[in-house]
Amino acid sequence: MLKNTLGKTGLNVSKIGFGGIPIQRLTQEQATSVIKELKNQGINFIDTANGYTVSEGYIGNALKEVGRENFYLATKAMGYTYESMKAFIEKSLNDLGVEYIDLYQIHNCSKEEQFANVISENGAFKALKEAKDKGLIKHVGVTSHNVTMLEKFLEYDIIETIQFPFNIVEQQAIELFQKAKAKNVAVIAMKPLAGGAITDGELALKYILNSGLVTIAIPGMDSEEQVIKNASVANNLEPLTDEDNKNIERIRKELGNDFCRRCGYCMPCPQGIDIPGMFLFEGYATRYNLKDWAMSRYNALKIKADACVKCGLCETKCPYELPIRKKLENVVKVMK
């Protein structure tokens, strides 16, 4: 497997990593088989999250059999205060069953209030630094769906990696990635298949790996066949052909403008709806085949898509001119 240095962490990671969302729908035995195939194919980077229900537990149990030493472990949590992040780190260590985690990331920090908490005197940074000093975590990163927020995080030396959606149709972070590269901050490309909207996975990964913009791409995988297929892209990487470029343009046209890139420009909603979040849950339900999980998260929200009063303010701010009100109506139907 071809490898890259993960920015200033110095970790030598495979160009294709493992995204831990889809294994939630597997059994432990199936998940272990997938992790075994990662080792067989030379994929040495595993990314999961505290919030991915059984994912950390599945991975931890699998590593007891496959070998912790064969992988760099990355996980993340939506803890923005000192106390919450400290608790999440302890939970991740326990669920994964490991003594340390290679990369711990602040998960989905996309709002000003969250950012303010993270950098405050008793914020997440304090917990992460403390855990790092104790050897519980080795490196620190951040994930977001907000380009502006990640630009702010780049100003802090503690941040060694950023994770953001990047694929054939989601291009809004190119300038951000260039800034990160200049600071030797690694770029982890999540949603390489746009949450499943892009069906040609081989072309999607080939495009990303040829971009020169990212350090590693982490497609979600829930079968040995997917692992083998994705690994083969990195192991046999070739430049994009004219035919590839034609297909890339075709995919962009097919998805068109009716596709949420989660840039966040539509926010804030006067009714308090997390508009990009609504479409994210819809995607998990319809593309990832994780409807039960998405429904449980969606139903736990105080404000859902049905709170929309059709004011249309969001549509005036959307750079892609999406019919957001109609799309929210569809979210309501899907999440019933």
Image (cartoon, helix red, strand yellow):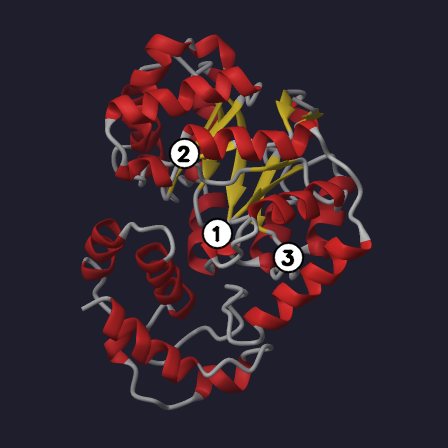
Q: Residues within 10 Å of mark 3 (few under 14, many from 20)?
A: some
Q: Answer with mark 3 or mark 1, whichever residue precedes in sequence.
A: 1
Number of numbered discs: 3
**Residue under numbered circle 2:** 48
Q: Is residue 217 left or right of residue 99?
A: right
**Residue under numbered circle 3:** 168
Secondary structure, mark 2, is loop
Residue 296, x across and y down, in percent = 19, 53
Answer above or below: position of 68 versus 57.
Answer: above
Residue 250, x across and y down, in percent = 66, 67
Find the distance from the CA under tag 2 to the CA under tag 3. Answer: 23 Å
Find the distance from the CA under tag 2 to the CA under tag 1. Answer: 22 Å
Q: Residues within 10 Å of mark 2 (few under 14, many from 20)?
A: many
Answer above or below: position of 181 versus 130.
Answer: below
Q: Nearer the viewer, residue 212 or 234?
A: 234
Residue drawn 46% across the image and 20% down it: 37
Residue drawn 57% across the image and 51% down it: 200
**Residue under numbered circle 1:** 115
Q: Of all residues shown, which one is farthest toward the bottom?
A: 311
Residue drawn 53% across the image and 56% down it: 198
Q: Is residue 52 left or right of residue 133?
A: left
